[in-house]
Image (spheres, helix red, strand yellow):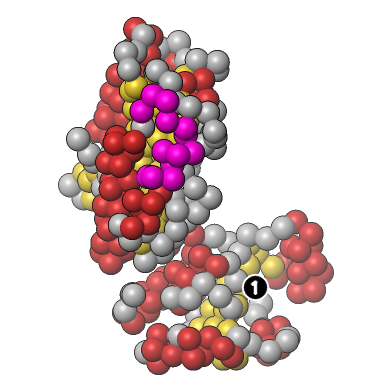
Amino acid sequence: MENRAEFRRRIRGVQDYLSEKNIGALTVSSEKNLAYLFGVGTGRAVVTEDSCVLWVREVYLGVYASLFERAPYSVRVYRPQAVERYVRRLAPARMAFEDLPCMQLKVLKRKFGVGRVVVVDVVERLRMVKSPYEVSMLRASASIAKVGLRRAHEVVAEGVRELDAVAEIEAAIRRAGSETPPFEGGMILAGGAHGADIHARPSTRKIGRGLVVVDLGARFAGYHSDLSRTLSVGALTRAERVVLEAVASIRDESVDRLCVGVKASEVAAYAEKRIEGLGYHFHHALGHGVGLDIHEKPSLSPQSKDVLTEGMVFTIEPGIYVPGRFGVRFEDTIHLTARGPKNLTESP
C-alpha cells in the first residue's frame, strides 16, 4: 500500500492546481480518484487549497484504521447532508466538480450559480504521470499478465473452444496474483473471422486454423496491465502472414518513436498512415493510459491533445481487422522514461 508521502504528494498536486486556477474547492466522489488520493475507493471528499476532508461510512473507520491513522487528510463519518453543509460553510467563490452527467451539472449550476461551478479533470491529469511506486505496481501487474500469455501459447489450439481456452488462461492469471480477471469483464480471445470484432467476447466457437487474437491483462494492488498478441494456429495464408508481420512491425516502429515531448497524435498518425498504406483502415486509437483504470489518460489517437511526458504508462496497440476473415492486434504496456520507452509486457 502507498505510504503517507505518496498520498501527500498527490493531494498537494490537486491543491496546487486549485490555487493556480483560483478555485475554492473540489469535490471528489469517483471510485478511482478516491483510491488515488486517499487509498480507499469509497466515500466523498472535499479538497481546498489548504485542507482535505474525506467522509466515509462508519464501518470503514475500522476497516481502514491503519491507513487512516497515518493519513495526511482528515477523516469523518458520513452523515446525510454532511458534505453539503461543509461546502456551504466554506462558501467558495468557485466550486469544482469531476465530470458529471449533464442533468446533474444543471442542478449544481442552479444550486451554486452558473459562474461558480466548474468541471475539472485535475485528478485524472495527475494520474497520467506515475510515481516510482506506481510503476513498480504496474510492472508487477505486467509480470502476471505475461504468465497468462505463456498459458495462452499452451492452450490455444485447433479444436479447443474459445471459452475453454479463456478459462485456463484466466485461472493462470488469478493463480499468479491478479485481483480480478483481465479487465474485470474478462479477456478477449477470438479466432478467425471472430477476431475481426475489435471487442470480441469469447464464445463456444472452436478454434480453427488461422489467426487468434488474445487480449489479456491483470490487476495488482489496484494497477492494471494490458497485453495483446495474435497467435497462429496451423498453416497461415499468405495474406494472414503479411498482415501479421506488418502489424507486429508497426507496433515496434511506434514504440521506437516514443520519447518525452512528442505529441501523442503524431505517433498515432504515423501508425495510421502505415496501416492505410497497406490498404486497410485503422479503427481505434493507437493506445491509452493504464493505471488504476484499464483505460485512462493519456489518449494516443490522431485527435489527442496530450504530449508524452516522463513517467506516463500507456499501451501501443496497432491492429488490422478484415470482416469475415480475421483480425490482428499486437499490444504492449509501455513506461516512458527520460531515456526512452520501457516495455513492461515484452515477451519472446
Name the residue nearer the viewer: 133 or 194.
Answer: 194
Q: Position of residue 221 (x, y in %)?
A: 37, 66
Name the residue nearer the viewer: 23 or 221.
Answer: 221
Question: Does 198 lie within the magenta span?
Answer: no
| Apparent side of residue 85 relative to residue 47 in the rendered image (left or right) | right
Residue farthest along the top direction in this orientation: 238
Q: Position of residue 307 (x, y in %)?
A: 39, 45
Q: Position of residue 94 (x, y in %)?
A: 65, 73
| Apparent side of residue 208 relative to residue 106 in the rendered image (left or right) | left
- Amino acid type, callout 1: Met
| Apparent side of residue 82 relative to residue 313 in the rendered image (left or right) | right
Residue range of the region highlighted in magenta in the rendering: 157-169
Classify 20 as above or below 321. Answer: below
Question: Does 166 lie within the magenta span?
Answer: yes
Classify 331 as above or below 70. Answer: above
Classify 184 as above or below 116. Answer: above
Task: Decide whether the magenta segment is chiefly helix, strand or loop.
Answer: helix
Give the residue number, with chain letter if any, for mark 1.
Answer: 95
**For residue 69, what is the image quadrant?**
bottom left
Residue 273 visible at all: no
Q: Which class describes the residues within 10 Å of circle 1: few (<14), some (14-19), or many (20+)? A: many
Q: Position of residue 106 (x, y in %)?
A: 79, 62
The residue located at (39%, 89%) in the rendering is 66
The residue located at (60%, 78%) in the rendering is 44
For the N terminus, the quadrant is: bottom left
For the C terminus, the quadrant is: top left
The residue located at (66%, 77%) in the rendering is 93
Residue 203 visible at all: yes
Q: Secondary structure at mark 1?
A: strand
